[in-house]
Amino acid sequence: MTFFTARGYVFLFLIWVVCSASSALALEVVVDDRQPIGSQKVGQGVEYIRDESKSLTLRQVTLPSQSWQTYEKDVLSFGFDNAAYWARFSVTSQASEEKSLLLEIAYPILDDIQIYLFSDAQPPQSLSLGDTLPFSNRPIDHHNFLLPLELKPDETLQVYVRVSTMSSMQVPFVLWNTDAFYKSRTRYTMGQGLYFGMLLVMAIYNLFIYFAVRHRSYIYYAGSVVGMMFFMASLHGFGFQYLWPQSPRINEWAVVAFLGFFGSCACAFTLTFLRLHRHSRVLYNVMMFHLVAYVLVLISAFVLPYRAAILFAVAVGFSACVSAAIAGIVQLHKGQREARYYVLAYGSLLLASVVIALNKMGILPRVFFT
């Protein structure tokens, strides 16, 4: 967190004066002793500005003439948008003692986040976050973005946040009591550890089976599990936290590349497991088309801008999941025993793919796995 020089402090002090004059317009989150805060989503009532030119400065957005809009849902979500967004709200302590809070932005693949804090009880502060910066720049070691807040009794803290990103514009603010956060995150981290551990075991197990029976479907399945593991690790920030913390440029291609690798292996698994080259030339050609498309998705991660690559990946993924589900249903109807297990698995994957795609486009709200 950054404190300012005397000149910078005077500048931000003048901005704080303007902010104070208009603070009644923004959402105010109240913390008191009667209803101790565990966690609280900060979305509905937050005021925001869409900065299409990405040129608005902090001074400009705090002018009384600036037109702010009020957000009506729990999580700020605007789909894929080239514009920058400003958001503002305030946190007021009516507690009898100092409160230790955490402000979480629970979407770890945002590119650039600028946070400004104003209070009459402490100097103005600013912080730069985002997955384009080394992980060590974060004030707290966590896969999401976390900002510690210390509020004295009767203190009001005004929060201004500017976000610009090539990924989906989702800014899920959550205000936490510090103790409640760490208790919740301990359980969450254990669950994620079990999830990734299970994926790793599945991949290794299928590799052993492949070496034992030499059937290609097992190595393709193992590859798809590894691809899914790294895709989820990239999407949820664990890859950046644990695997490449000092190499933020990897974040530019990781999500799309691992999705492309997963899809390529999954299509190859479909071709071999359902033996489509024997049973249906049409379905074989359709799945081969999607295999090639997924390879192009993988390549696009390194040659196309992130937004173009991820939209291409979403389109290919949705089409491939539908085609794979149809292939399984057709083979099931023909009496192929293996197809029943395949249809059950791909039915779940298809549903998850549709939910994730609609969420990234801002149509559906966030759920726990998006």
Image (tube, rainbow, N blue to C red):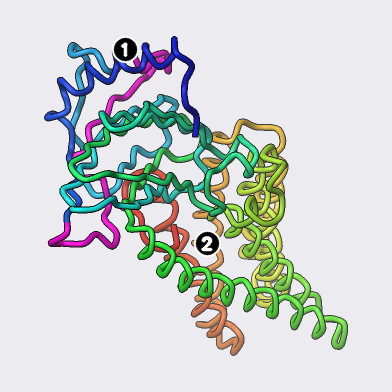
Residue 132, by quadrant, is top right
Residue 59, by quadrant, is top left
The residue drawn where x is 37% and y is 47% is 103
Q: Please provide the residue range marked out in magenta.
A: 33-61
50 left or right of 289 in image? left
Q: Is residue 80 above or below residue 293?
A: above
The residue wearing badge 1 is 60
Query: Dot 2: within a 10 Å radius of its alpha carbon, few (fewer than 14), some, or many (20 or more) residues?
Result: many
Q: Is 47 included in the stretch rendered in magenta?
A: yes
Which of the two residues, 99 or 37, is positioned nearer the viewer here?
A: 99
Q: Under tag 2, what secondary structure?
A: helix
332 left or right of 245 in image? left
The residue drawn where x is 18% and y is 53% is 96
209 left or right of 339 in image? right
The residue drawn where x is 56% and y is 58% is 320
**Image quadrant occupied by the C terminus:** bottom left
Question: Disc number at residue 321?
Answer: 2
Query: Dot 1: within a 10 Å radius of its alpha carbon, few (fewer than 14), some, or many (20 or more) residues?
Result: few
